[in-house]
Amino acid sequence: MTAYRFARFGSRAAPLEGTSAIEAAVEGLAAGEIIAIQHPSGFQLLTDAAHPKAIQRLRQRKGTPLPLPLLYHELFILTEDLEVDAADMLALQSPEHPIVLLTRTADPLSPLAFDALAPGLSRIGATLPGTPLLSHLMAHWQKPAVISSANRHGAPPATHPQRDRTKLAPLADAILFELPPQAASGPEPPVLLHSPMNHTEIRFRPATKAQHPLEELRALRQKSKLEAHNSLGLFWDDRGCLQYRMTGQATEPLRAEGDWGGLFKKAGAILLGLSEAHYPYEAALRLESAAHVYFRHNFPKRTLSFLQDWDGRTAVPEHLLNAISEAHAQGHESTLIAARLHLSLADYAGRQAEAQQADSLLLAGRYFKNAWLLDLICRFWGSTYAIVC
């Protein structure tokens, strides 16, 4: 049996080993403490997911405003708190042990502190234990825990229980690790999401380094065997929306007028009162969450696109922001307006493909890692274009 060791930072008491180490860690979680626990990708921080003050301490110590994921001891309890379909179940139990973004249920079984974990979002990340140590601890804890990498925001995580004690001590109250102590050697688990209608898998932590936008679009085209097609490539992130006509081996850049990079930030300020972003792409995530609330109860119709009355004289981002402001001033629900924004963007993608006489549509960049946007594009244009994302 693997030996475990538990020690408190700043304590002169002898470290505990074996079952006593696991029991001490559980007692610490119950008291609202933060426990650093060994993981193949680097140490992780655990605390009680139903303890808002503990979660706030975790945020303060890490210096992060990012949403925090959940760790469950078994799939059955996870499904009582979060909506899970077959694709999600397979992913959660896969050897990668990813963090899967899931929609919270209306009445979760666990008293989770959702507002502290993922403010303003309808989805939250969740995972199952991927190591014997985590499995052993969570089998004793029997409740959801917050799990997060053991590092200050933007810094590399601690990887060794002894060499990195000076990194871990300011973050955690205690440490739990295996004997003999070993350094981390594995990759960080991916974060993934399945889109609601088509169940397209969207990954947020690629295994490889990010490519240049055009190279990423070319790689998509090659992987999907679309080199002989006339493709429209769209790469959209907070720097803007880069567009390319791709025919055979030739690539022609297209002009995309307007502030595409700032569209979600400005729309978030109008609809959600987000005067500043607390973390990258917060406005996009929160606007998709608002749209998600609408689409869960209403059929998506392209006729609701704000581009239905677009005259072509105004840049699309400006037209959309004007339409959002007008609808908001008229007292329309923010969830409906957010949904109409997503419908408009899906409408725009197909209109651009049509204007370029394309027969395939390539989508890349952070803003196209938007589950509802991808599903809507596929719904409206999937019978007309080959769509690859």
Image (tube, rainbow, N blue to C red):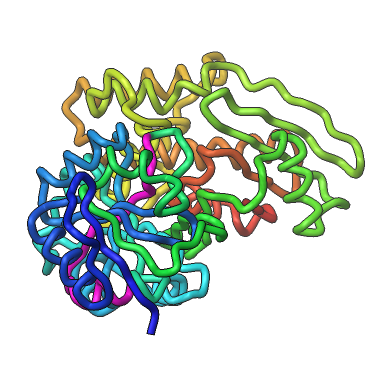
Please report the residue visible at 37 percent of the width from the left and 40 percent of the height from the top: 167
Please report the residue visible at 66 percent of the width from the left and 43 percent of the height from the top: 209
In the orientation shown, which residue stands out farthest toward the bottom? Answer: 1
Name the one closer to the observer, 379 or 154.
154
**Relative to residue 258, is residue 388 depicted above or below?**
below
Q: Is residue 197 visible?
A: yes
**Relative to residue 60, is residue 148 depicted above or below?**
below
* Quadrant of the image occupied by residue 60: top left
Q: Is residue 297 visible?
A: no
In this picture, residue 79 sits left or right of residue 235: left
Locate residue 346, reporting x and y percent: 51, 42
Locate residue 112, reporting x and y percent: 14, 57
In the orientation shown, which residue stands out farthest toward the right? Answer: 249
Quadrant where the N terminus is found in the figure: bottom left
Q: Which residues are magenta?
A: 135-152
* Quadrant of the image occupied by residue 179: bottom left
Residue 51 included in the magenta stretch of the image: no
Locate residue 96, reporting x and y percent: 51, 68
Name the one closer to the observer, 69 or 271.
69
* Quadrant of the image occupied by residue 324: top left
Name the one closer to the observer, 369 or 231.
369
Q: How many marks?
A: 0
Please report the residue visible at 31 percent of the width from the left and 27 percent of the height from the top: 278
In this picture, residue 48 sits left or right of residue 97: left
In this picture, residue 257 sits left or right of residue 249: left
Locate residue 142, reporting x and y percent: 17, 74
Please report the residue visible at 20 percent of the width from the left and 64 percent of the height from the top: 25
Residue 141 included in the magenta stretch of the image: yes
